[in-house]
Image (cartoon, rainbow, N blue to C red):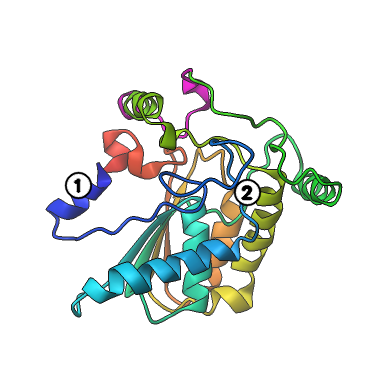
Amino acid sequence: EIISIFNKNGFSVYALDHRGHGKSGRLGVDKNQVNVEKFDYYVEDLRDFLDTIVVPKLNNNKLFLFAHSMGGGIGALFLGQYNEYFNAAILNCPMMEIDTGKYPLFISKIIAEIACIVGMGDKYILGHGPFKKKSKEYDSSILSTTRNHKYFDKQQEFEYLQTSGGSFNWLKEAFKATRKIVKKKNAECVKIPILLFQAGKDTFVKPGGQNKFSKYAKDCKLVRIEESKHDTYNERDKIFE
């Protein structure tokens, strides 16, 4: 839906399925698990995608990044390392501080580290597991019932959309990545204009990391939408628009 809207407003769109997502190869114990050896691989994948697919077709047009959640974290890391690709970026509820729920952050980090040390890095994070073919509206990342059901129906139909929880190794790597993203010396390397959307009812990522990044990045405008959950681009029309 959002790609269609971009197209109607004169933008060509190039989309990348990250490792372990969509139609890209799976690296977990099953087809649902998100796993990666090193988080930096996501960043280098994005660079390869740009170099081989996008840039050769750019024809001197401007290039903008739209990145959501984990993709927003990947985007922030990318922009801190490579300044020559994008003219500006939208980071939508980017993963800069993970919401670990009932487990305190430092406890979650210790558990992830220990799990990897004892050879359980490829096991599902506590409370996560394979995709379940039933609706969990109460745990949805969006408030829009219509869009929620629409995407859920697609997940039932297409196996490649049935991405579920992450592994302990992914979690350990994600903690390392978010710590790097919000460091002052790294965020200051992001020099292009950034529009960062923050959701007031987000239960996937916390605002603290986003606040730090927006403070340190050279030109970052933070827009907080109080009534939105995590997927602001897929929310009720009032929020979506």
Crowd around label 1: few <14 · some 14–19 · many ≥20 (10 Å): few
State the residue position of label 1.
Answer: 4
State the residue position of label 2.
Answer: 98
Residue 190 seen by the camera: yes
Kind of residue at badge 1:
Ser
Q: Is residue 127 left or right of residue 107?
A: left
Quarter of the picture holding the N terminus: top left
Crowd around label 2: few <14 · some 14–19 · many ≥20 (10 Å): many
Residue at image x 36%, y 70%? 50
In the orientation shown, which residue stands out farthest toward the top?
Answer: 134
Q: Are marks 2 and 1 in contact (CB under 8 Å)?
A: no
* Coordinates of residue 148 in the picture (x, y in percent): 37, 27
* Coordinates of residue 18 in the picture (x, y in percent): 46, 53
Q: Is residue 176 left or right of residue 135?
A: right
Kind of residue at badge 2:
Ile
User: Is the residue 161 above or below the residue 153 in the image?
Assistant: below
Residues rendered magenta in the picture = 134-147
Closer to the chain start, of discs 2 and 1, is 1
User: Is the residue 203 above or below the residue 131 in the image?
Assistant: below
